[in-house]
Amino acid sequence: MDSGNPRQIPEVLPVTELLARLPGRNTGRFGRAGDPWNLLFLGTDAALGAALEAGGWTRLPDTYLGSVIGGLAQILRGRKLTLFPPMNFYSLFGRFQDRNWVLVTTPILQRHHFRLWKIPFTDPEGRQVWWGSANYDMAARFWDFSHVPDPDADAERDFIGKTLVGAPQVAMQTVMSSPNVPRSGENDKGYPFFTDGRVLVVQLCG
Protein backbone atom coordinates (compact mmCIF):
# COMPACT_ATOMS: atom_id res chain seq x y z
CA MET A 1 0.00 0.00 0.00
CA ASP A 2 1.34 3.45 -0.88
CA SER A 3 1.91 5.63 2.18
CA GLY A 4 0.08 8.45 0.44
CA ASN A 5 -0.89 11.59 2.31
CA PRO A 6 -1.75 11.02 5.98
CA ARG A 7 -4.36 13.81 5.79
CA GLN A 8 -6.47 11.50 3.64
CA ILE A 9 -6.89 9.16 6.62
CA PRO A 10 -9.17 10.17 9.51
CA GLU A 11 -7.34 11.51 12.55
CA VAL A 12 -8.99 9.02 14.92
CA LEU A 13 -8.98 5.34 13.94
CA PRO A 14 -9.62 2.12 15.89
CA VAL A 15 -6.85 -0.46 15.77
CA THR A 16 -8.61 -2.59 13.17
CA GLU A 17 -8.80 0.40 10.82
CA LEU A 18 -5.18 1.30 11.48
CA LEU A 19 -4.12 -2.22 10.55
CA ALA A 20 -6.17 -2.08 7.37
CA ARG A 21 -5.09 1.34 6.16
CA LEU A 22 -1.56 2.15 7.32
CA PRO A 23 1.32 1.37 4.91
CA GLY A 24 2.93 -2.06 5.18
CA ARG A 25 6.51 -0.86 4.54
CA ASN A 26 8.68 2.17 5.07
CA THR A 27 10.91 3.74 2.41
CA GLY A 28 14.67 3.27 2.33
CA ARG A 29 17.62 4.39 0.22
CA PHE A 30 17.01 5.96 -3.18
CA GLY A 31 13.25 5.80 -2.61
CA ARG A 32 13.18 2.01 -2.63
CA ALA A 33 10.70 0.02 -0.53
CA GLY A 34 12.28 -0.65 2.85
CA ASP A 35 11.44 -2.84 5.83
CA PRO A 36 8.05 -4.37 6.65
CA TRP A 37 5.80 -3.01 9.34
CA ASN A 38 5.61 -5.20 12.45
CA LEU A 39 5.09 -2.84 15.44
CA LEU A 40 2.25 -0.58 16.55
CA PHE A 41 2.43 1.26 19.87
CA LEU A 42 -0.44 3.24 21.37
CA GLY A 43 0.46 5.74 24.08
CA THR A 44 2.45 8.80 25.07
CA ASP A 45 6.11 9.39 24.37
CA ALA A 46 6.85 9.18 28.11
CA ALA A 47 5.03 5.86 28.57
CA LEU A 48 6.69 4.43 25.47
CA GLY A 49 10.18 5.37 26.64
CA ALA A 50 9.61 4.08 30.16
CA ALA A 51 8.26 0.73 28.94
CA LEU A 52 11.17 0.18 26.55
CA GLU A 53 13.78 1.14 29.13
CA ALA A 54 12.15 -1.29 31.57
CA GLY A 55 12.56 -3.94 28.85
CA GLY A 56 16.29 -3.29 28.55
CA TRP A 57 16.24 -1.13 25.42
CA THR A 58 18.49 1.87 24.76
CA ARG A 59 17.40 4.83 22.69
CA LEU A 60 19.94 5.89 20.09
CA PRO A 61 20.69 9.58 19.52
CA ASP A 62 18.68 11.17 16.74
CA THR A 63 21.70 12.12 14.60
CA TYR A 64 24.82 10.39 13.27
CA LEU A 65 27.02 12.90 15.10
CA GLY A 66 25.19 12.31 18.36
CA SER A 67 25.66 8.57 18.01
CA VAL A 68 29.40 8.94 17.33
CA ILE A 69 29.90 11.27 20.29
CA GLY A 70 27.81 9.06 22.56
CA GLY A 71 29.72 5.96 21.49
CA LEU A 72 33.12 7.59 22.11
CA ALA A 73 31.95 8.70 25.55
CA GLN A 74 30.94 5.12 26.42
CA ILE A 75 34.34 3.80 25.30
CA LEU A 76 36.21 6.41 27.35
CA ARG A 77 34.15 5.54 30.43
CA GLY A 78 34.67 1.80 29.92
CA ARG A 79 30.97 1.14 29.39
CA LYS A 80 29.31 -1.29 27.00
CA LEU A 81 29.07 0.24 23.54
CA THR A 82 25.35 0.67 22.79
CA LEU A 83 25.09 4.11 21.15
CA PHE A 84 27.31 3.30 18.15
CA PRO A 85 26.97 2.62 15.26
CA PRO A 86 23.96 4.78 14.43
CA MET A 87 20.93 3.64 12.46
CA ASN A 88 20.39 4.52 8.84
CA PHE A 89 17.48 6.79 8.12
CA TYR A 90 14.24 5.50 6.61
CA SER A 91 11.08 7.46 5.87
CA LEU A 92 7.34 7.15 6.31
CA PHE A 93 4.83 9.76 5.16
CA GLY A 94 7.85 11.71 3.89
CA ARG A 95 9.54 11.91 7.33
CA PHE A 96 12.53 10.17 8.85
CA GLN A 97 11.99 8.01 11.93
CA ASP A 98 11.38 9.75 15.26
CA ARG A 99 12.88 7.12 17.55
CA ASN A 100 15.60 4.46 17.25
CA TRP A 101 15.87 1.75 19.90
CA VAL A 102 18.54 -0.93 20.29
CA LEU A 103 19.39 -3.88 22.49
CA VAL A 104 23.01 -4.80 21.76
CA THR A 105 24.26 -8.40 21.78
CA THR A 106 27.75 -7.88 20.28
CA PRO A 107 28.94 -4.24 20.09
CA ILE A 108 28.98 -2.86 16.52
CA LEU A 109 28.27 -6.27 14.96
CA GLN A 110 24.97 -7.63 16.31
CA ARG A 111 21.94 -5.99 17.86
CA HIS A 112 18.18 -6.04 18.11
CA HIS A 113 16.76 -2.80 16.80
CA PHE A 114 13.70 -0.97 15.57
CA ARG A 115 12.58 2.38 14.25
CA LEU A 116 9.43 4.23 15.30
CA TRP A 117 7.44 6.98 13.63
CA LYS A 118 5.05 9.19 15.55
CA ILE A 119 2.24 9.38 13.03
CA PRO A 120 -0.64 11.90 13.04
CA PHE A 121 -3.35 9.56 14.27
CA THR A 122 -4.85 8.55 17.60
CA ASP A 123 -7.07 5.65 18.57
CA PRO A 124 -10.59 6.21 19.98
CA GLU A 125 -9.09 6.38 23.51
CA GLY A 126 -6.96 9.33 22.43
CA ARG A 127 -3.66 7.45 22.49
CA GLN A 128 -0.87 8.50 20.15
CA VAL A 129 -0.12 5.99 17.37
CA TRP A 130 3.48 4.89 16.68
CA TRP A 131 4.32 2.87 13.53
CA GLY A 132 7.43 0.71 13.72
CA SER A 133 9.65 -1.75 11.87
CA ALA A 134 12.09 -4.08 13.61
CA ASN A 135 14.71 -6.67 12.70
CA TYR A 136 17.80 -8.30 14.16
CA ASP A 137 21.20 -7.21 12.82
CA MET A 138 23.25 -10.38 12.38
CA ALA A 139 26.46 -8.84 11.04
CA ALA A 140 27.97 -5.51 9.99
CA ARG A 141 28.46 -4.53 6.35
CA PHE A 142 31.32 -2.09 6.67
CA TRP A 143 31.59 -0.87 3.09
CA ASP A 144 28.35 1.10 3.34
CA PHE A 145 28.08 1.28 7.14
CA SER A 146 24.99 -0.89 7.44
CA HIS A 147 23.96 -4.25 8.89
CA VAL A 148 22.85 -7.58 7.48
CA PRO A 149 19.37 -8.27 8.90
CA ASP A 150 17.87 -11.59 9.90
CA PRO A 151 15.28 -12.29 7.17
CA ASP A 152 12.79 -13.55 9.79
CA ALA A 153 11.03 -10.29 10.71
CA ASP A 154 8.55 -12.16 12.93
CA ALA A 155 11.29 -13.41 15.26
CA GLU A 156 12.31 -9.85 16.12
CA ARG A 157 8.70 -8.76 16.54
CA ASP A 158 8.11 -11.61 18.99
CA PHE A 159 11.37 -10.89 20.83
CA ILE A 160 10.31 -7.29 21.42
CA GLY A 161 7.00 -8.47 22.85
CA LYS A 162 8.80 -10.75 25.30
CA THR A 163 11.02 -7.94 26.55
CA LEU A 164 7.94 -5.88 27.41
CA VAL A 165 6.23 -8.56 29.50
CA GLY A 166 5.94 -7.24 33.03
CA ALA A 167 6.67 -3.60 32.15
CA PRO A 168 4.27 -1.56 34.32
CA GLN A 169 3.52 0.84 31.47
CA VAL A 170 2.15 -1.93 29.23
CA ALA A 171 -1.61 -2.38 29.58
CA MET A 172 -1.96 -5.07 26.93
CA GLN A 173 -0.18 -6.51 23.92
CA THR A 174 -1.38 -8.73 21.13
CA VAL A 175 -0.42 -9.73 17.59
CA MET A 176 -2.84 -8.80 14.80
CA SER A 177 -2.84 -9.27 11.04
CA SER A 178 -2.48 -6.45 8.52
CA PRO A 179 -3.38 -7.00 4.86
CA ASN A 180 -0.82 -4.37 3.78
CA VAL A 181 2.29 -6.13 5.10
CA PRO A 182 3.99 -8.14 2.32
CA ARG A 183 4.64 -11.75 3.28
CA SER A 184 8.07 -11.76 1.63
CA GLY A 185 10.34 -9.54 -0.41
CA GLU A 186 13.59 -7.61 -0.36
CA ASN A 187 14.38 -4.37 1.42
CA ASP A 188 16.06 -1.33 -0.12
CA LYS A 189 19.52 -2.90 0.23
CA GLY A 190 18.45 -6.12 -1.46
CA TYR A 191 18.23 -8.24 1.69
CA PRO A 192 15.35 -10.75 1.79
CA PHE A 193 12.68 -10.85 4.47
CA PHE A 194 9.67 -12.98 5.28
CA THR A 195 6.79 -12.51 7.70
CA ASP A 196 3.33 -13.82 8.51
CA GLY A 197 2.00 -10.29 8.05
CA ARG A 198 1.11 -9.77 11.70
CA VAL A 199 1.87 -6.68 13.75
CA LEU A 200 2.65 -6.51 17.48
CA VAL A 201 0.12 -4.09 18.97
CA VAL A 202 1.19 -2.69 22.35
CA GLN A 203 -1.29 -0.61 24.33
CA LEU A 204 0.40 1.58 26.93
CA CYS A 205 -0.88 3.09 30.14
CA GLY A 206 -0.62 6.71 29.09
Image (tube, rainbow, N blue to C red):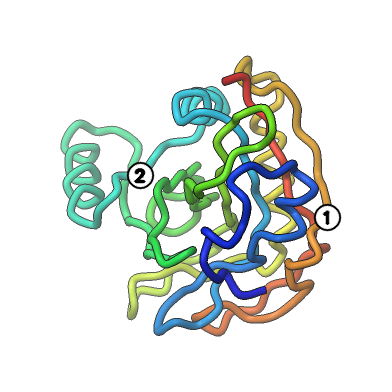
- 37 left or right of 139? right
Q: How many marks?
A: 2
- Residue located beneath label 1 in the image: 177
Element marked by disc 1: strand
Q: Which residue is mark 2?
A: 60
Question: In the image, what residue occupies the spot 81% across and 65% down?
Answer: 179
Q: Is residue 22 above or below residue 78?
A: below
Q: Quadrant of the N terminus?
A: bottom right
Residue at horizontal 32%, vertical 56%? 85
Label whose residue precedes the other's in the sequence (2 or 1): 2
Vertically, is 191 above or below 11?
below
Q: Given this view, does label 2 or label 1 mark the residue nearer the observer?
A: 1
Residue drawn at x 42%, y 36% is 58
Residue 91 percent location from the top left of the image:
44, 66
Residue 87 at x, y percent in the picture: 38, 58
Circle 2 sits in a helix, a strand or a loop, which is it? loop
- Looking at this view, is 103 or 99 the one in front? 99
Task: Give me the residue at 69% from left, 44% from top.
Answer: 13
Classify 36 as above or below 112. below
Residue 152 sits in quarter: bottom right
Instruction: Report how far apart the C-alphas of labels 2 and 1 lie in the structure.
Output: 29 Å
Q: Disc 2, disc 1: CB below 8 Å? A: no
| Amino acid type, mark 2 | Leu
The one of 12 and 29 positioned closer to us in this rendering: 12
Identified by mark 1, the residue type is Ser
Residue 119 screen position, x and y as percent: 51, 49
